[in-house]
Amino acid sequence: DEEVWEVAGGEVRRSTGEERGGGRMAEAVQQSDRGLNLKEVQENVGPWLIYFAELVMQIDDVAIWAYEKGCAVWEWLEPYHPDELIPVVVGILLVFFGGTFAVLIQAIEAARLFGFEKVFTSLKALAQEFSAARKAYERDDMVDADKDGVADVKQMDKKQLAARKLGVILRAVDPQKLATALEGLTQAWIAIIATLRIKFAQAITLGTSIGNTLHRYVTPFVLKFTKPLVPREYARWLPVILQYTFRYIGVSIAFWLVRIVSALFMGMKGAELFTIGLVQYFVRHGQLSADVFDTGSPILSAGFAVIALFGAWWQISRNFSLPFPLNILLLPLSIAERVLMFAVGSKGLPGAPVEGA
């Protein structure tokens, strides 16, 4: 090794290249350790966690209100035996939304095959831990340790409040129960996505091919206009963003074709559930003769066809979009449908199609 004379600590000493390399490596490790400041991360991320917690609690309030109103409506309808009309309601949903929520409906079917009981058990455990965390969170808002008549949380800045609330939540939640619940939901999610990918394999392959073709020919053209508008350090992200954007567009086109088929198929299933369920309800309560209930009856067959075709036409004519106010009321279902579409069609998730395979 080449020897170099250097001054260190007021002394002149001789060092080899290997010694200098080891010193630089140790210095780099020390700088790396100093670069990750957990306290700084907590101070920066903590306030956002508080906002998220407040948002989740507001959503929970809305969900509780909706559940209570639903129970009240159910009690009001009990004299009319609403449980007997469940097939009718499900049939209507399939007729008019079978294509709009094609992926979500298949996901529910996959969850049924996986085992609703396992999913419900995990959701129940997660809800219990959330309830315990929320009670502790709200109880902490009332604490006045210094007895000055003002709650402690109101005398803290955002960083202090975030650190305090994080500690409250961690103490209130049972980590073992939380881990078990999340593990159960993760297993269900993987099983559902794997099942959906099998069912929609052709659509995924077609959509991925469309997306890759768009990415190959359109991305260079788009980059000519977008690169000058983006800072240089972020420009390298543009190809990746465009790749997944075009893949999403391709999968959306493929799934639009799937929705047409699903609208017709689900329309027939929904029409059957609706018609037979409604006839059974009226026959059970003496409003119709039992002779009407004949699966081979021309009246029922004609009813199936008319209802199914009308539902499919209604969905296709609206391009599978929801009218107001259904677009607001069913917004959570629309979000779930889009998330499932992305998860099923994404290349980076387990089980996604591989180019060249």
Image (cartoon, rainbow, N blue to C red):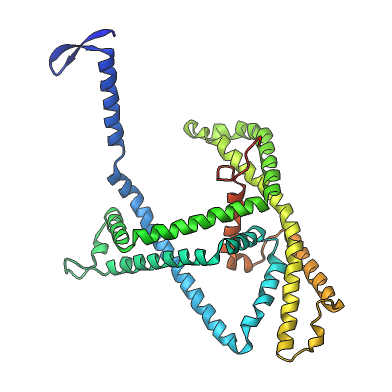
* Image position, residue 50 (x, y; %): 36, 58
Q: Which picture quadrant has residue 165?
A: bottom left
User: Which residue is the extreme one toward the left?
Assistant: 10
The residue under the point 73% across, 59% down is 262
Q: Quadrant of the C terminus?
A: top right
Can I make out residue 18 in this image? Answer: yes
User: Which residue is the extreme one toward the right?
Assistant: 298
Q: Which picture quadrant has residue 222?
A: top right
* Image position, residue 159 (x, y; %): 29, 53
* Image position, residue 356 (x, y; %): 66, 34
* Image position, residue 64 (x, y; %): 46, 73
**Side of 287 where 41 appears, left or right:** left
Q: Which picture quadrant has residue 334?
A: bottom right
The residue under the point 46% across, 63% down is 122
**Side of 117 where 210 appears, left or right:** right
Q: How many marks?
A: 0
Can I make out residue 339 in this image? Answer: no
**Side of 326 where 155 appears, left or right:** left
319 versus 69 height, above or below = above
Q: Foreground residue, 165 or 180? A: 180
285 versus 214 height, above or below = below
User: Which residue is the extreme one toward the bottom?
Assistant: 286
The residue under the point 69% across, 77% down is 88
250 versus 230 height, above or below = below
The residue under the point 28% across, 55% down is 163
Q: Foreground residue, 112 or 262? A: 112
Q: Quadrant of the N terminus?
A: top left
User: Which residue is the extreme one toward the top?
Assistant: 2
